[in-house]
Image (cartoon, grey):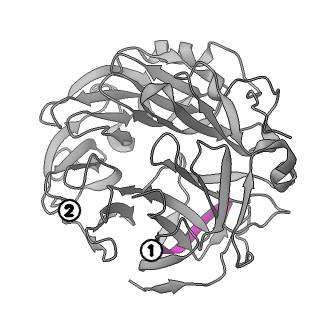
Amino acid sequence: MAAQKRKIILPLLGAGILTAGIAMGAGLSGQDTAEAAGRSKPAPAAASSLPASPSSFTAAAGNEAKTEAEFVRLQQIRFLNATTGWMVRSGDSDADRQPLRLLTTHDSGRSWSEQRLPGQYAAGLGLSSAKAGWALVYDGASEKSGTVSYSRARLLHTKDSGRTWQTQWSRAVSYTEEFPTKNNLVATGGTGAYALVGGRLLITHDGSAWSEAPLGYPEFEPQHVSFADAKNGWVSGTMPPFKGAVDAKDVVVLHTSDGGKTWKKQLAAGPTDEENSDSSGLRSAALDFPDAKTGFLLTDDPSMMAGDLYRTTDGGKKWTKVHAKLRSHRPLLTGMDFVDAQKGWIFASPGAGPVEGGLLMTRDGGKTFVNGTEAGYDVDFAQRFAGGKGYAAGSMADGQNYLTRTLDDGKTWEIIYPASSAGDADAKS
């Protein structure tokens, strides 16, 4: 039977809630052949193994039984371009203790190949080519009071789409699962990559040896990283607004033009309301540079349930606040992705609810947004490409994840993974 395209059918909590929210806010090394390990909540899972030979499947009706009985949890997703992408999947139910798996597609999600991935939790994924890339994974899981923590970080590299993995860097690091989830690894093509691990920025220029970047600001806590190319990169995070400041923070952007050798401060963004905010909880919510000149920073001020969106069009020399007090909680803004200086998406989760998340879509550089709930009501990943193509991932009512695709700039969406989660078979490809 030919593969059928399916429309997304997800529970929504009411069409206009997200829009109303916007208005209201106007090292170890060696070949890694160990068994892959998984986890399930609430307790961490014991190690388990996959068959040595790789497996693959196509998201067609005849193969739906492959994934229908399995609980789907997508930990990381990254696309190299509109057709080639990688995902990290794990199990996340009491009855299903699956190891981590890397899924790769070269045809816009119509078919997926599956390989094992060492580790218990994936916190970063970066592609340097269709076959080569890195994964940041954590091991040594333990659970206390419902919180899962890990004791060791590893940076893994593959040259063959995940069939084999090489451990390039490994250290004892305390890490607790983040919400919202973010990608802590950026590949810049060829042999360059950057990773945030344990409050440090790690760099490789030769594709194998990793070292810590000298950021030059001891009180700076990095939270997001974005590189436009191998030389030009930015890191956002928080630090005190002045020496000796107590319970006060600024969101700061640092820039490098020499591949991480030296860094300069470009922006220090304060709270959304200077008189009423409690800036101790201020954080970087997202950072994205689609090219070496254009960049966006989204802050989050929990005390005001709002954040500010900043834009630069000259590589960070000058930043402009293009949207003040954008509502950032209920729904919780979980990340953003821009394709150029004008068009981009901010994605949102219900958080504490009871409101829906979805996509905030802009065509004027963040000055105005429209609601895009067709992608789902709980979205924690989205990536947009030129020509109207894009991907988004989120959660269903039972907590399972899905990946959906648009070909018309977010007007319509179809689930492309897992096949068994789709609904009607009348969407056009």
Residue 331 falls within the magenta-colored stretch? no
Image position of 271 (left or right of 31): left
Which of the pair 65/181 is nearer the observer? 65
Q: x%, y% of residue 320?
A: 21, 25
Labels 2 and 1 touching (C-beta < 8 A): no
Q: Is residue 68 above or below residue 327?
A: below
Question: What residue did someone put label 1 on?
Answer: 173
Instruction: Tell me the residue at 14%/31% (across/down).
Output: 318
Mark 1 Cα shell of 10 Å, populated few (<14), some (14-19), many (≥20)? some
**Which secondary structure class fits the magenta region best?**
strand
Q: x%, y% of residue 35?
A: 66, 81
Image position of 362 (left or right of 259): right
Instruction: Tell me the residue at 55%/32% (across/down).
Output: 348
Element marked by disc 1:
strand
- Residue 36 seen from this side: yes
The image quadrant of residue 395 is: top right
Magenta-highlighted residues:
145-155
Q: In this view, does 80 lie above or below 285?
A: below
Sequence-wise, which precedes: disc 2 or disc 1?
1
Which of the pair 246/398 is nearer the observer? 398
Image position of 213 (left or right of 202): left
Which of the pair 33/197 is nearer the observer? 33
Q: How many labels does the image show?
A: 2
Q: x%, y% of residue 353?
A: 65, 30
Look at the image and tell me in which quarter the C terminus lies: top right
Q: x%, y% of residue 315?
A: 17, 37
Question: What residue did someone put label 2 on?
Answer: 218
Element marked by disc 2:
loop
Going by the numbered disc 1, the residue's amino acid type is: Val
Image position of 218 (left or right of 207): left
